[in-house]
Amino acid sequence: MATHSDLEQRLGVRFDDPVLLQQALVHSSYVNENAGSFPESNERLEFLGDAVLGLVIADELYAAFPGEDEGMLTELRAHLVRRDTLAKAARKLDLGAALLLGKGEDDGGGRHRPTNLAHVYEAIVGAVFLDSGLETARSFVLASLREELVYVADESFTLDPKSRLQEISQSRFQTTPRYTVVETEGPDHARRFTVEAVIQGETVGSGSGRSKQAAEKQAAQKALEQLESSDNDPETD
């Protein structure tokens, strides 16, 4: 296992209080299996890091995209702070190797689990913030997510309706949409499908098309319009 000095070198951050870095690496399963070794897991640091990360990314996008509206900025932020993006950044930093896991979690592949990797990345952000302040945390976030930031800044970056709906659903509701075929009509050579987009058990959009894919795409677009409409409805505030 790499030393903390090796990890600090990969992070590009030197900790004044190494205990904060150690705490950021402690998974709840380790605490559960090693009572008394650590007073708590990295979950509180993860909570703080999530907030710091959101602020840094929102500020960066606000400055980088002066012509974009709130809806698009929200979608871009959702892409940048989603689990898979953070897990990718954690892998590049080899944070999985540094995690302190319980034996069961470790044996079950916990060092490679996207959720664990995303959480430890957020915990590191929280630890950097507490140890060195917002500007150092900002520098760490922007450096470690540089590739994704360049990606969303590319003019060719677009999100099709299904991808956009997934990003928003994961950001707002921490779940992904499901697509359910509710009706199939017409002969085999001219089949038409009706599909509903469902989030947390609630239908948020419906679409139809000559293929399931086309129907899902239309349902996702209708769902996006519905979510945008509810955002702008003052009675929902």
Image: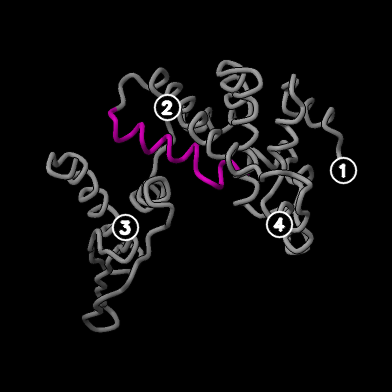
Q: Which is more foreground, mark 4 or mark 1?
A: 4
Q: Quadrant of the C terminus?
A: top left
Q: In the orientation shown, which residue stands out farthest toward the bottom?
A: 187
- Identify which amino acid the numbered label 2 is placed on: Ala
Q: Name which of mark 3 and mark 4 comes first in the sequence.
A: 4
Q: Name which of mark 1 and mark 2 comes first in the sequence.
A: 1
- Identify which amino acid the numbered label 3 is placed on: Lys
- Identify which amino acid the numbered label 1 is placed on: Met
Tell me which residue sits at (71%, 57%) in the image. 32
225 and 170: which is toward the camera:
170
Marks 2 and 4: in contact by CB < 8 Å?
no
Start-end of magenta stretch: 69-87
Give the residue at mark 2: 58
Secondary structure mostly taken by the magenta-highlighted segment of the chain: helix
Q: Which is more foreground, mark 3 or mark 2?
A: 2
Q: Name which of mark 3 and mark 2 comes first in the sequence.
A: 2
Pointer 3: residues within 10 angstroms few (<14), some, or many (20+)?
Answer: many
Marks 1 and 3: in contact by CB < 8 Å?
no
Q: Which is more foreground, mark 3 or mark 4?
A: 4
Give the residue at mark 4: 32
Task: Answer left or right for 47 relative to 9.
Answer: left
Provide residue 93's location: percent of width, then percent of height. Answer: 72, 36
Q: Name which of mark 4 and mark 1 comes first in the sequence.
A: 1
Q: How many marks?
A: 4
Q: In the orientation shown, which residue stands out farthest toward the front?
A: 36
Above or below: residue 134 compared with residue 165: above
Give the residue at mark 1: 1
Give the residue at mark 3: 217
Above or below: residue 226 compared with residue 147: below
